[in-house]
Image (cartoon, grey):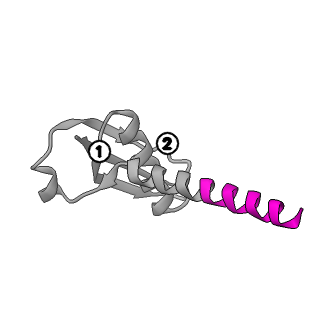
């Protein structure tokens, strides 16, 4: 019985890990302005200024870029005023 329980835990852990890796592989990636010249611009996105760290703002920009159909984004402006806000151009 312990073996079956351990196997279930291993399968669940593997599934969660695979899902996390799959999400990371699909998330829009930050690139430089120079790299962006190789891609087509599809618009801009901006954070809601609800995040408290630059990393959280970049994660939000990545998600918004995905929703806009982009694969890449370039941060073009950022501001920290107790909260962090940013604007990025989105490319595909």
Q: Name the residue rendered at 81%, 60% in the picture.
A: 4
Label 1 sits on a secondary structure element that is: loop
Q: Secondary structure at mark 2?
A: loop
Main SS type for the magenta part?
A: helix
Answer whether residue 8 is magenta in the image.
yes
- Residue 5 appears left or right of 83: right
Q: Point out the image quarter for the N terminus.
A: bottom right
Q: Is residue 11 magenta?
A: yes
Q: Residue at x 29, y 38 (%)?
A: 44
Give the residue at mark 2: 48
Q: CA distance from mark 2 to mark 1?
A: 20 Å
Vertically, is 28 above or below 70? Answer: below
| Left or right: residue 92 compared with residue 7 | left
The residue at the point 87 percent across, 66 percent down is 2
**Residue 71's disc number:** 1
Check the image and name the residue furthest to the right: 1
Tell me the magenta residue range.
1-15
Q: Position of residue 41 (x, y in %)?
A: 18, 38
At x 36% / y 41%, what residue is drawn? Answer: 65
């Amino acid at each position: 019985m312990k073996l079956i329980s351990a196997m279930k835990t291993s399968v669940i852990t593997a599934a969660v890990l695979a899902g996390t890796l799959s999400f990371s592989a699909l998330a829009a990636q930050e690139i430089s302005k120079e790299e962006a010249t190789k891609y087509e611009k599809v618009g801009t996105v901006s954070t809601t200024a609800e995040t408290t760290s630059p990393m959280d703002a970049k994660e939000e920009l990545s998600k918004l870029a995905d929703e806009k159909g982009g694969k890449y984004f370039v941060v073009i402006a950022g501001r920290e005023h107790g909260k962090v806000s940013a604007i990025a151009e989105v490319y595909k």
